[in-house]
Image (cartoon, rainbow, N blue to C red):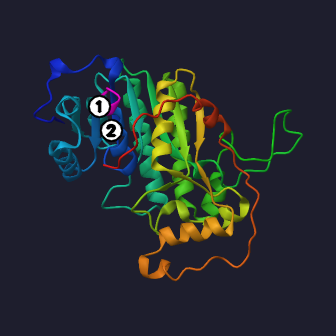
Amino acid sequence: MTIAQDLYNEQDSMFCSKKVCVMEAAGQLGSTLVHRLLLRGYTVHAAFQNHDEMQRFKRKYAGGNVDESKSKKLICFHADPLDYHSIVDTLKGCCGLFYSFEPPTDYPTYDELMGEMEVRAAHNVMEACAQTDTLNKVVFTSSATAVLWGTRKRDQHDSPHSHSCVDERDWTDISFCKKYKLWHGLSKTQAEKAAWALAMDRGVSMVSINGGLLIHPDLNIREPYLKGAAEMYEGGVFVAVDLKFLVDAHMCVFEDVSSYGRYLCFNRVINSSKDATTLANMLLPPSASSKTESLEDDMVYEQRISNQKLNKLMLEFETGSDVQVY
């Protein structure tokens, strides 16, 4: 069932070439993408799993965070990623989808069950995309943890252009994740693989953004991405991304007709004691972080991960206004 803002008028909506869907719109990334898309002139279908989150979001926009002409281009939907039909309704008339999975509020822990849930959600979303005639491109938000775990180190014999760095050509080893209970990496890998398989089978145009640890105000030590942080750090593959850069990357791969495949997305590499201390101070509560001292050693681990493909694509991208968190 569609729940629209009172100000929304279907006759005022833009052509489907400028109508996109953001799912899930309640998260840090999703809510900020909605705001950026509205500023860039898109009509946005903002999809929410949770009805209360949707109402809070609508109240923020009713409070004057964007002008009236842009608020008319926002329409909110209640869409459960495990409910195929609600997704189909949400996507009607859209030319693009920005999809990211947010764990349900009543089951926020990453484990094997979460992995199964995320795969089912990805399957439903891609099937719904295949049934939406107006849809031209899907931007699927994955994670760097679907790239870096258990990947073998390339050597000079692989191909003339190979190197020792991990990049978007690599896939996390599912058996490795199961063995070491790296549930976040397992979930993201299985869900992304399921999405790619369906996209290719159904002829859906898709690109994926494999983002590093998202730096945001609510980040804390319980973030699932951080399982195995010490091993990532020592392996030179511990990467993070600022919200603005992540949003810019999503906009760029959507709007650039030459984008294809997977894109590793990060603008911070945590590979020195200084970097690790800075991150620790962000993750720990104020009482604990105030006592955190710099690590004793000055070792800098060699960076073994590359986002060169994304950086090349974004060279001439116009980012527009500064990002704001909603």
Closer to the camera in the image, 31 or 135? 31
Q: Which residue: 46% across, 45% down? A: 244
Residue furthest to the left in view is 6
Q: Say whether disc 1 or disc 2 marks the residue closer to the N-terminus.
A: 2
Residue furthest to the right in view is 157
Q: How packed is label 2: few (under 14 Cα within 10 Å), some, or many (20 or more)? A: many
Q: Is residue 237 visible?
A: yes
Specify start and end residues of the magenta stretch as a single range. 39-44
Note whether 263 is above or below 106 in the view shown: above
What whole-number distance in Å separates the C-alpha atoms at marks 1 and 2?
Answer: 7 Å
**Image quadrant where residue 11 sits:** top left
Closer to the camera in the image, 118 or 265? 265
> Which numbered tag is attached to residue 44?
1
Question: Residue 258's spot in the image, x, y percent?
Answer: 57, 22
**Image quadrant where residue 196 sits:** top right
Question: Residue 92's spot in the image, x, y percent?
Answer: 28, 25
Which element is circle 1 on? strand
| Residue 41 lies within the magenta run | yes
Question: Residue 275's spot in the image, x, y percent?
Answer: 62, 64
Which element is circle 2 on? helix
What residue type is disc 1 on? Val
CB within 8 Å, label 1 to label 2: yes
What residue sits right under mark 2 in the picture? 34
**Image quadrant where residue 293 sits:** bottom right
Q: Is residue 29 left or right of residue 47?
A: right
Q: Is residue 59 left or right of residue 313?
A: left
> Which numbered tag is attached to residue 141?
none
What residue type is disc 2 on? Val
